[in-house]
Amino acid sequence: MAAKQGSTATKRGSASVSAKVEDHLRRIARSDNKEIETMVGMRQGLKDVTQLDNRSFALVKIAALIAVDAPPASYMWQIGNAIAEGVTPEEVLGTMWAVAPQVGGPRLISAAPEIMLALGLVLNEEDGEDWK
């Protein structure tokens, strides 16, 4: 199926992507808060069911990202949300310590640079060599 005439969508391979789909994907990739909140609108309902306070809920989600070896953009999004809820960098580090026995060293090593970047820390050139 070809893209509609006048569409700005780009066709790669065998998939045809409409301009509407492309727009939604681009907004998600740019961390468009409105777009993402619409997609994950169930977040508030889930939070209410857990009976956790906002900060604890945010820390649990960071723990889950570490456990599943989440992609970098996930850390940027979730740590930004956590900081907005009042979570401190010390609590993020504490969460890493808390899940360390369950997730193991490789997941912690993978998460550390992503968490650093999400917290606004600069990776030193010598640090980067270990992660390549």
Image (spheres, rainbow, N blue to C red):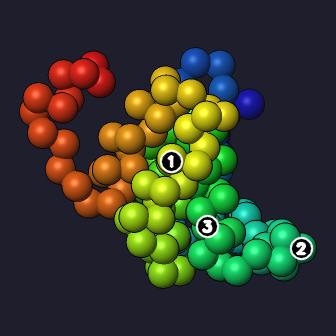
Is 25 positioned to the left or the right of 53 in the image? left
Q: Residue at x 33, y 60 (%)?
A: 119
Gap in Å between the C-alphas at discs 3 and 1?
13 Å
- 3 w.r.t. 25: above or below: above
Q: Do the residues under discs 1 and 2 have CB atoms within 8 angstroms?
A: no
Q: Do the residues under discs 2 and 3 have CB atoms within 8 angstroms?
A: no
Residue type highlighted by circle 1: Met
Gap in Å between the C-alphas at discs 2 and 3?
14 Å
Q: Earlier in the sequence, mark 3 or mark 1?
A: 3
Label 3 packing within 10 angstroms: few (<14), some (14-19), many (20+): many
Looking at the rendered structure, the secondary structure element under dot 1 is: helix
Q: Which residue is mark 1?
A: 96
Picture coordinates of residue 130 (x, y %)?
A: 24, 21
The answer to whether residue 95 shows anywhere in this view is: yes
Label 2 packing within 10 angstroms: few (<14), some (14-19), many (20+): few
> Which quadrant of the figure has residue 20?
bottom right
Label 1 packing within 10 angstroms: few (<14), some (14-19), many (20+): many
Looking at the rendered structure, the secondary structure element under dot 2 is: helix
Q: Any mark on residue 49, and which?
A: 2
Gap in Å between the C-alphas at discs 1 and 2?
24 Å
Q: Residue at x 52, y 70 (%)?
A: 82
The answer to whether residue 65 shows anywhere in this view is: no
Q: Quadrant of the N terminus?
A: top right
